[in-house]
Image (cartoon, rainbow, N blue to C red):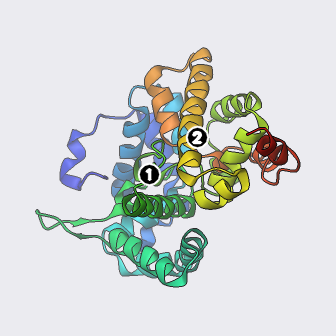
Amino acid sequence: MVPEPSQAAELPVLADAVCEAIARRYPESGASRYGISTADFLRIVSAVVIRYAAEAGAAEQMQLVGMLHVAELSLARACSAGNDAAWEEFLTRFRAPLYETAYRVAKDETAARELADELYADLYGIPGADGRRVSKLDYYMGRGSLEGWLRTVLSQRFIDRCRSQARLVSLEEQTEAGIGFAAPSPPDDAAPDPRLAAALDAALDELHPEERFLIAAWYLDQRTLADIGRQLGAHESTISRRLDRLTGGLRKAVRKRLQAEGISSRRCDEMLHDLDVRDLNANVTAKLRQESLPATFYKKDRSTT
C-alpha cells in the first residue's frame, strides 16, 4: 500500500531525474482535483517505482514512470482515502462495467450483484486496527488499466468462491491483487515493456493451437471452466488443471526469454507479476483470438480420446 506521509522518509531516495519525470506527470494525473498535492503525488508514484524497480537504473525507472496510468492511480488513491469527488467519478465510470463483468462470469443476475457488491465493499474499505481505512484499491499500482485490474479482481473472487463451494482445483497462477491475463488494452502512451510482449509472443508460437485456445477462452473471452469443458469433452476440474500447468509453463518460457535478453532475475519476477496478455500489444491478442473459435481440431481431439 502507499505509505502515509509520515512513512515517506523510509522510502529510498530516487534520482533527481526520476523525481522530475514524476513531477512532469502531475498535471495530467488530475490529482489536484482530489486534493492530492505534488508532494503526495511524488510519494505515491515513488512507492510504485521503488516496489517494482528499486534496483534498476534511473533510465529504467523513468521508463516505468512514463508507463504508469497516473490518472487512474490518483483516482484509486483518492478513493481509498475517502474522497467523495473521487468516489463519484469512480462509480460513474466503473459501476456499469463491473456489473456487466459480474453477470458475464456468474451467469446469474442475483449472484452477479452479490459478487459486485462484495467487491465494492472491499474497495470502499473498512477501518483497520489503527483506525486507518483499508481499501483494496491500495493494491492497484497503475501498471495496467484500472478497469482491467477491477475485472480481474472480480473474476478471481468468483473463481475463489467456486473453488470453496465446489472443491474444484482452481488456477494457482493468478497474481497478487488480481493482476492476471484478462485486462483491456491500456492507452498507447502507457504501453508495457515491449520485451515482455515479444517474449510472450514467441512463447505462444510454441504452443499447440488447443493450448492457445484454452488461454483465449479463459483469459480473453472469460468463459467458465464448465463451458470450456463441455466443448472439449472434459470435466471442468481437468480444464482447470490443464490451465494451471499451461500458465505455469508459459511463465517459465517467458522468464527464460527475458533472462536471455539480459534482464535480471528480480526484474523478471516484477515483469511477470503483472503479466497481462491484453495489455501487451495487438499482435499477442490477435494470435490468441485466432484460436478463440476453433474449427475442426476439437472434433479430431475428441475422436482420439
In this rendering, position of residue 221 left or right of residue 78 = right
Q: Is residue 74 above or below residue 56?
A: below
Mark identifier at residue 230:
none
Disc 2 marks which residue?
Answer: 242
Quadrant of res 201: top right
The residue located at (36%, 59%) in the rendering is 164
Residue 194 image point, x, y percent: 67, 34
Q: Residues within 10 Å of mark 2 (few under 14, many from 20)?
A: some
Disc 1 marks which residue?
Answer: 141
Residue most toward the right? 296
Q: Is residue 133 above or below residue 113?
A: above
Q: Residues within 10 Å of mark 1 (few under 14, many from 20)?
A: many
The residue located at (54%, 83%) in the rendering is 109
* Pair 2/1: label in front: 2
Circle 2: residue type? Arg
Circle 1: residue type? Met
Residue 206 image point, x, y percent: 74, 27
Asked if one can make out residue 224 in the rendered structure from this viewpoint, the answer is no
Asked if one can make out residue 181 in the rendered structure from this viewpoint, the answer is yes
Question: Does dot 2 land on a helix, a strand or a loop?
Answer: helix
Residue 64 image point, x, y percent: 53, 40
Q: Is residue 1 above or below residue 254?
A: below
Residue 277 image point, x, y percent: 64, 45
In this rendering, position of residue 62 left or right of residue 37 = right
Q: CA distance from mark 2 to mark 1?
A: 30 Å
- Label 2 or label 1, whichever comes before in sequence order: 1
